[in-house]
Image (cartoon, grey):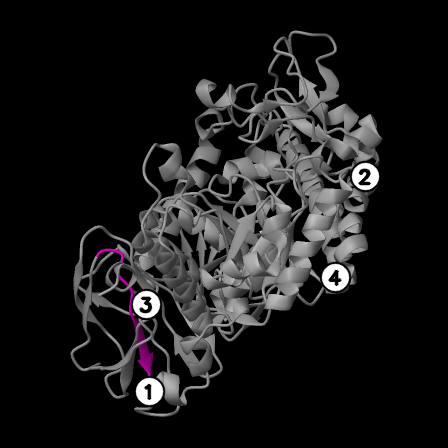
């Protein structure tokens, strides 16, 4: 039994109209299952290709490794300036097109995206990210300064360099002109064909201290722009020149007269000012950066994609984006960054990292969700690259949460070609069933960004929830506990914020969003809904909908029941036509032996994504045995 079959076991329960017909032979999904096409397979991230590597006879090696394409860019050396390096990139894209490999374009020299390797600020230094800082020891206490020292711009693993202001429309237009238009000029004929998406990597508002890198690591980072060590860390918020005018136009108030409230105070006026400021900032970030890129991509026949920073920390979502869920909603293919290939991370912050982009896609009527996946955590800790079994299990739980596009920072070299091919086929088979299926969560977990806007107070040091208000701590703790508890209780859910709720409809006990019906709403402790959302929730409750605040999750119906119960199995649900699909992934270190309750009146088959085998499964006993990190697929063949 192969490592991926033995260790990465995923259970999918699919209802099909034809009883007893082997899936590969008679099922309409059989061809893709037997030989997954390039679109279903993972893509390798390749930041630099030498001219000899851009030839078709070399590029075909990616195909032989089981991949569906590459994520690439013009080489970082002499970034955007060297015609010779552009010629190599063009040759690589031409070669991929000839081989049937898909191409995504990575939009930055390293990360974070937005600066075009410094070219945006080279064009105009006035485009630099700006922070309003607060120093109570000075009179006046407010000043504007560049958001560089003590931010992610000067504390990331790639390079310390100054960063543009992503809520400055002109700065973003410059980035698009320097980056996206340059790619269009050279490879635009492949847009919408072999070139299918642009990938933006961890852009943010910058005006927050998220902590410094460890000193041994920091010493290895390239310093492009000198860091002024005398710059004092201060509480800060992002700023742009037209922000006061935008605030006045929306709220009929003078933001400059209310600046103290952004940094201190617990009066209703203070809290209202903070809520309004961050709501406006979230809109500007979503519109001016993510929205501008999405508009350009759609006009040019490609998808916008990428992932954001600190998905697992919802308090960080306030200063980094205003609202990470809202900003993710402006991707055609929202994404996450999965730095760990220990599958148990799903029970820590992984469920949130995946739920955010998956929910953004669902609430916008989309399906595709991207992951940038690696074993970075393991290799940075000095461990060996993770094995095939861990790679497959990590892919399986993410697919169960809705991920369809796997972009890889795994490296082939430490692994055998056979293992890499097995991984590519494994991912392809997951997508053969799930990519054209719709996630079917029945519950909404409320994303409490509205409350955190009012509670968030900037601090000088690294942002920690312990430095925020007691109410903020209760909300964040409750949200995290509820999310993990829903996962362990096998209740599939999506995230939605106050605006999603306010725009929802109530239909005979169901909460309808984006054409999807939910029968339960779970609210974290201490949240206070705005009036429109509160009225909608009240109507939902009076119509028979289930509203849970802070606990009592036993009122919710799980996807399937396990005996004995196991929080180490991930169970979610999909619909594909009239056929239900239920993923279940054993992420635990211990084996599972028990029963899964499924419909005993219908016939079932076992689909194995590691081997491709299809075998009968007896639903009357429901006997389910899963080794640690093991995967199978169960398919119901009639209703």
Q: Label 3 to label 4, Cα distance in Å?
A: 36 Å
User: Tag 4 or tag 2, which sits nearer the N-term?
Assistant: 2
Q: Secondary structure at mark 2?
A: helix
User: Tag 1 or tag 2, which sits nearer the N-term?
Assistant: 1
Q: Tell me the tag on residue 298.
A: 4
Q: Secondary structure at mark 1?
A: loop
User: Tag 1 or tag 3, which sits nearer the N-term?
Assistant: 1
Q: Label 2 to label 1, Cα distance in Å?
A: 61 Å
Q: Determine if residue 482 is in view.
A: yes
User: Tag 4 or tag 3, which sits nearer the N-term?
Assistant: 4
Nearer the observer, disc 2 or disc 4?
A: 4
Q: Is residue 472 above or below residue 428?
A: above
Q: Is residue 45 above or below residue 298?
A: above
Q: Is residue 400 above or below residue 221?
A: below
Kindly check if marks 2 and 1 are in contact, taking CB atoms under 8 A apart as contact. Answer: no
Q: Secondary structure at mark 3?
A: loop
User: Tag 1 or tag 4, which sits nearer the N-term?
Assistant: 1
Kindly check if marks 3 and 4 are in contact, taking CB atoms under 8 A apart as contact. Answer: no
Q: What range of the chain is rendered magenta?
A: 628-639
- Circle 3 residue: 610
Residue 208 at x, y percent in the picture = 60, 27
Residue 343 at x, y percent in the picture = 33, 50
Which residue shows up at 35% across the image and 64% down it?
Answer: 556
> In the image shown, does 573 or 139 lie closer to the viewer?
573
Q: Quadrant of the N terminus?
A: bottom left
Crowding around mark 1 (Cα neighbors within 10 Å: few <14, some 14 to 19, many 20+) is some
Would you say 534 lies left or right of 76 here? left
């Amino acid at each position: 039994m192969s490592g991926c079959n033995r260790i990465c076991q995923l259970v999918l329960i699919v209802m099909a109209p034809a009883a007893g017909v082997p899936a590969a032979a008679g099922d309409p999904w059989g061809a893709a299952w037997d030989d997954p096409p390039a679109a279903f397979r993972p893509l390798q991230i390749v930041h630099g290709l030498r001219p000899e590597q851009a030839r078709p006879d070399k590029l075909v090696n990616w195909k032989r490794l089981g991949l569906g394409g590459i994520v690439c860019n013009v080489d970082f050396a002499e970034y955007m300036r060297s015609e010779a390096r552009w010629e190599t990139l063009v040759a690589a894209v031409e070669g991929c097109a000839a081989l049937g490999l898909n191409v995504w374009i990575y939009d930055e020299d390293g990360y974070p995206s937005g600066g075009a390797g410094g070219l945006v600020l080279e064009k105009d230094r006035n485009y630099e990210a700006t922070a309003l800082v607060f120093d109570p020891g000075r009179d006046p206490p407010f000043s504007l300064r560049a958001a560089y020292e003590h931010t992610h711009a000067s504390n990331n693993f790639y390079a310390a360099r100054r960063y543009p202001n992503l809520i400055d429309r002109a700065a973003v237009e410059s980035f698009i002109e320097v980056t996206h238009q340059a790619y269009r000029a050279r490879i635009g004929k492949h847009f919408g064909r072999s070139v299918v998406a642009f990938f933006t990597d961890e852009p943010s508002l910058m005006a927050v201290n998220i902590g410094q890198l460890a000193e041994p690591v920091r010493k290895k980072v390239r310093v492009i722009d000198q860091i002024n060590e005398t710059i004092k860390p201060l509480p800060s918020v992002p700023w742009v020149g037209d922000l006061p005018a935008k605030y006045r136009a929306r709220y009929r108030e003078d933001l400059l007269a209310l600046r103290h409230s952004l940094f201190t105070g617990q009066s209703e006026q203070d809290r209202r000012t903070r809520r309004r400021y961050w709501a406006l900032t979230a809109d500007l970030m979503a519109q001016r950066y993510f929205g501008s890129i999405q508009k350009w991509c759609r006009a040019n026949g490609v998808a916008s994609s990428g992932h954001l920073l600190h998905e697992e920390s919802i308090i960080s979502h306030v200063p980094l984006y205003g609202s990470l869920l809202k900003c993710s909603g402006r991707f055609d293919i929202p994404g996450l960054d999965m730095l760990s290939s220990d599958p148990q991370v799903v029970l820590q912050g992984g469920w949130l990292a995946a739920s955010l982009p998956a929910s953004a896609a669902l609430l916008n009527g989309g399906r595709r969700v991207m992951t940038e996946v690696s074993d970075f955590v393991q290799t940075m800790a000095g461990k060996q690259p993770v094995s095939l079994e861990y790679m497959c299990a990590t892919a399986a739980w993410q697919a169960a949460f809705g991920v369809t596009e796997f972009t890889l920072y795994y490296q082939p070299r430490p692994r055998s070609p056979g293992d890499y091919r097995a991984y590519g086929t494994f991912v392809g088979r997951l997508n053969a069933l799930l990519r054209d299926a719709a996630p079917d969560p029945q519950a909404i977990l409320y994303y409490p960004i509205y409350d955190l806007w009012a509670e968030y107070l900037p601090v000088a040091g690294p942002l920690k929830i312990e430095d925020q208000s007691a109410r903020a701590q209760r909300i964040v703790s409750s949200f995290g506990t509820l999310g993990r508890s829903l996962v362990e209780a096998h209740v599939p859910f999506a995230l939605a914020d106050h605006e999603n709720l306010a725009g929802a409809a109530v239909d005979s006990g169901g909460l309808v969003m984006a054409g999807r019906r939910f029968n339960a709403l779970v609210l974290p402790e201490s949240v206070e809904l705005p009036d429109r959302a509160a009225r909608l929730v009240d109507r939902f409750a009076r119509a028979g909908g289930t509203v849970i605040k802070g606990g009592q999750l036993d009122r919710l119906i799980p996807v399937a029941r396990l005996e004995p119960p196991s929080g180490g199995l991930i169970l979610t649900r999909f619909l594909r036509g009239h056929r239900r699909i239920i993923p279940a992934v054993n992420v635990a270190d211990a084996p599972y032996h028990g029963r899964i309750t499924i419909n005993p009146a219908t016939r079932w088959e076992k689909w194995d994504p590691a081997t491709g085998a299809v075998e009968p499964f007896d639903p009357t006993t429901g006997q389910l045995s899963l080794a640690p990190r093991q995967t199978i697929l169960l398919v119901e063949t009639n209703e």
